[in-house]
Amino acid sequence: MPLFPDPPATLQELAPRWAHFCLGVQRFVEEELGARLRGKTLLIAFSGGLDSTALLACFSFLAPRLDAALRAVHLDHGLRAASADDAAHCRAVCEAFGVPLHEACEEVAALAAREKLGIEDAGRRARLALYERVRRETGAAFVLLGHQLDELAEDQVMRLMRGAGWPELGGMPAIDPERALLRPLLLTPKAELRAFAQYLDVPWREDESNADQAFLRNRVRARMLPLLVEENPSYLEAAARLWRLARLDQGHLAGLMADHEAHALSDGESLLLSRASLDALHPSLRLRLCKRALERLGPGQARMDNLLDLERAYAEGRIGAAVRFPGDKEALVTREGIAFGRVRREGG
């Protein structure tokens, strides 16, 4: 017996509401994000959960219209007893929609212990590494992720709790050209995705770890977001507006910094922002230029409190002052400006 009834074969066979939904996702990606999808290979990050199921279904209907080749990738994290069932479910769904599936296994708990990471961070690192490998192997233009509006609202709250600056407070990006990541559903409420999957009568898997209150994101989802929605029933729409405003400002700031960033001196492992370049900037832009320099050195979040410490040291002329950042990165105030590099681990 099949897992679920055969889905509609084409966009034209969908009910008007859901055909319009799929076309709206395409417009968001092409018109608002400026992503070129036509004639490309697209890789769906597929966990088997609701969000990625709706994403896979949506793009299976859009692929012929875009002349795009669709593939999916699934990672077994080795954390759940039901992980083999998850993988079997993903294979069945992909077969029903005619999407080739790439599968891999990773002992995420062992990775977390080896790299001294939390389980969430280790899982994220393993997934992104797999996605990038499969993307290169298949020649995919983008990896499509299933993050949706409820998760964007959660991300904004968590960034506020960490003291994130503007425009980072707007939340995760919908497009990351450097890592070829795309979030087509980022401004779509989860309730809409659930209704879409129910209309298609396609099942999805539930991950019990999403209810584990040991994780901050789950506490924000279960406790804080409902209170915000209770105070403002249109809170999700407000989160989408905040994201759009932040994206506008991010683009403007990137343009202002482009010339200064181009003059940064780099040998691949270290980078120098010259004093002449830094002194020409308002402290607000100087902070962002330093953040961008740290990002160019690789993984590891440039925390705002560390950046403020660095700005203070530079403004006070404390030559030799060093500020450490996550990812074994360090910034050093020198007579020439600010030098950024990696800190060598003992025995490394």
Image (cartoon, grey):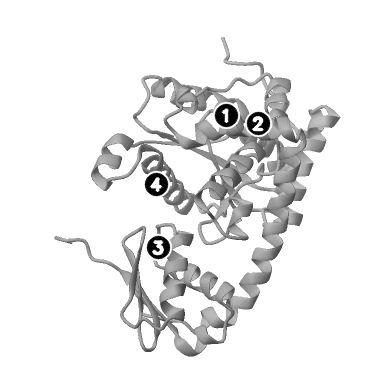
Helix, strand or loop at label 4? It is: helix
Frontmost of labels 3 and 2 is 2
From mark 1 to mark 2, how far is it between C-alphas? 7 Å
**Residue 59 seen:** yes
Q: Mark 3 = which residue?
A: 298
Helix, strand or loop at label 1? It is: helix
Which residue type does callout 4 highlight? Arg
Frontmost of labels 4 and 1 is 1
Name which of mark 3 and mark 4 comes first in the sequence.
4
Badge 1 vs badge 2, beta-carbon distance below 8 Å = yes
From mark 4 to mark 2, how far is it between C-alphas? 31 Å
Give x and y (percent) for residue 72: 53, 38
Name which of mark 3 and mark 1 comes first in the sequence.
1
Residue at 36% over, 81% down: 318
Which residue type does callout 2 highlight? Leu
10 Å neighbourhood of mark 4: few (<14), some, or many (≥20)?
some
Q: Mark 1 = which residue?
A: 223
Badge 3 vs badge 2, beta-carbon distance below 8 Å = no
Name which of mark 3 and mark 2 comes first in the sequence.
2
Badge number at residue 125: 4
Helix, strand or loop at label 3? It is: loop
Q: Mark 2 = which residue?
A: 227
Question: In this rendering, would 152 be left or right of 234?
Answer: left
Tell me if residue 119 comes above or below residue 171 in the rendering.
above
Give x and y (percent) for residue 107: 30, 35
From mark 3 to mark 1, how far is it between C-alphas? 34 Å
**Residue 339 falls in image quadrant:** bottom left
**Residue 272 falls in image quadrant:** bottom left
Tell which residue pokes out farthest to the left in this image. Answer: 347
